[in-house]
Amino acid sequence: MNDDSSSRIVTGLLDWISRAPAGARLPPTRALVAEYQASPVTVQKALRTLSARGAIETRPGVGAFVRAVRTARPLDFAWQTEALRSPQHRLSPAPATMRASANTSIALHAGYPDRELLPERLIRQALGRAGRSEAAVTRAPAAGLPELQAWFAQELAAATPLGVTPVAASDVIVLPGSQSGLSSTFRALVSAGQPLLVESPTYWGAILAAEQAGVTLVPVSSGPQGPDPGALARAFAETGARAFYAQPNYANPTGAQWSPDRAAQILAVVREYGTFLIEDDWAHDFGISTEPVPLAASDDAGHVVYLRSLTKSVSPAIRIAGVIARGPARERILADRRASAMYVSGILQAAALDVVTQPGWASHLRGLKQQLRARRDLLAESLAEFAPTAHLTGLPHGGLNLWAQLGDGVDVHTLVRACEDEGVLVAAGHEWFPAEPSGAFVRLNYSGPNPGAFPEAARVIGGVLARLGS
Ligand SMILES: Cc1ncc(COP(=O)(O)O)c(C=O)c1O
């Protein structure tokens, strides 16, 4: 017996173990004696070493087994660095709004409404019915279930003024949420390396989708009234961009809603430059003190590509949206959808359609309006009382968020961390800026759980701001 032959057996068995399933039985001692030409004592020593390292467990009288929980060895993926080289575009960290939160936190950072704001009874009934329908066992058409296409088209047609040709069901493509619709639309209408005008600030997910598509973002400043039409025209002229992504109603994050005049001026600029307006109507069901009239309703020349999401208002689990586009633009978007996802789950489409066509849907939306109003006002009043230096850029007429500007010199990341230490989650505003932030902002969502804690949250934010000298 010597140490060398024992370690030779250890090395050989570790290799064997690395390929064996957990719980596998090692060859019996006499087989190891024969294989390694070593004495039984040397084999036993090697087995003791493996046991001490946690690689095997020995059961007296039965044998030695690969440990079910193996000691981790560091994994080596260095080869992938050679294979992948540098990413084509910056890889963004996980967005703050998608972070899970502990039940004890007051969550003002997230983007999806709490379940108490969802039509839960309608959802459960709809899913039951969809499960029993044909949609549960058949493939849906690439552009979506015809009845759901018709529903999206009718909703927009109902807002269409006289003299404008309303959209048809065949103009609609159903999507598994509007996020993937943004990706498809950017790829289909802008393409890699080309400029896309976006409001600044704008939805972080649109920034992400554009970057992923290799599109070059060109920010156009957007205030409480929306972007300045003159500035938009200059940006089109200077960059040669063919599209502008915008949220005319209850923009995320600012809550801004364009006036009818402003909307008409923006549409005129888009027409003049022969470009597309990609209108993201994410908050169509979240009007509080105004009605959201889509800009797309005033366009029958195919300039406006209209995205309408049901994800947040029906259920984040029934993730359905529609994109309405006319002419070759629609064909390009559909080609992208076919290539990336082929079709959207029919069972989810059937469930979404069921929810929005129930008589209870309209009354749910009326109740939702009241709840959002109460939540918005409570959070805004709490901030005014306990965090007066967090200046709201406006009280939004709809949507789910307050956008607050902080005093000059406040480090937003320090504020976010300090609030989190005291159990209040807020989202730093920089994620909504396609370039450098124009100031220190936080976005506060009032649709999360436990609105009764809003005054407490405002007290924490105010306390942290005071400590930071604001
Ligand atoms: C402005 C905006 N557009 C699109 C989306 C994505 O919507 P969906 O959940 O339907 O993919 C969101 C979600 O937060 C949003 O805020």
Image (tube, helix red, strand yellow):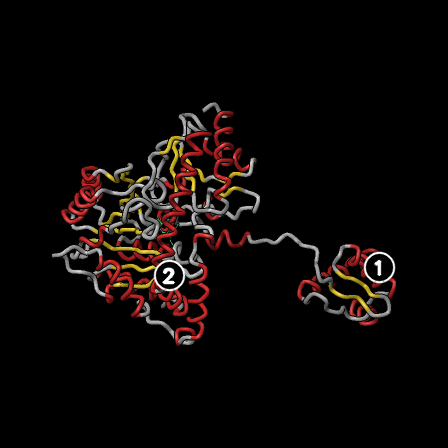
Which tag, 1 or 2, sits closer to the chain's start? Answer: 1
The answer to the question of whether label 1 and label 2 lie on touching residues, with beta carbons closer than 8 A, is: no
Which three-letter amino acid code belongs to the residue tagged 1?
Lys
Q: Against 223, is 191 above or below?
A: below
Q: Residue at x 38, y 70 (%)?
A: 346
| Residue located beneath label 1 in the image | 45
Outermost residue, left side = 163
Q: Which residue is nearer to you in this view: 43 or 424?
A: 424
Please tell me the numbered disc located at residue 151: none
- Give x and y (percent) for residue 304: 22, 53
| Residue located beneath label 2 in the image | 360
Q: How many marks?
A: 2
- Mark 2 lies on a secondary structure that is helix
Q: Quadrant where the C terminus lies?
A: top left
Label 2, residues with CA under 10 Å away: few <14, some 14-19, many ≥20 = some
Q: CA distance from mark 1 to mark 2?
A: 74 Å
Q: Which residue is nearer to you in this view: 425 or 334?
A: 425
- Give x and y (percent) for residue 222: 28, 38
- Give x and y (percent) for residue 111: 43, 48
Classify residue 162 as left or right of residue 224. Answer: left
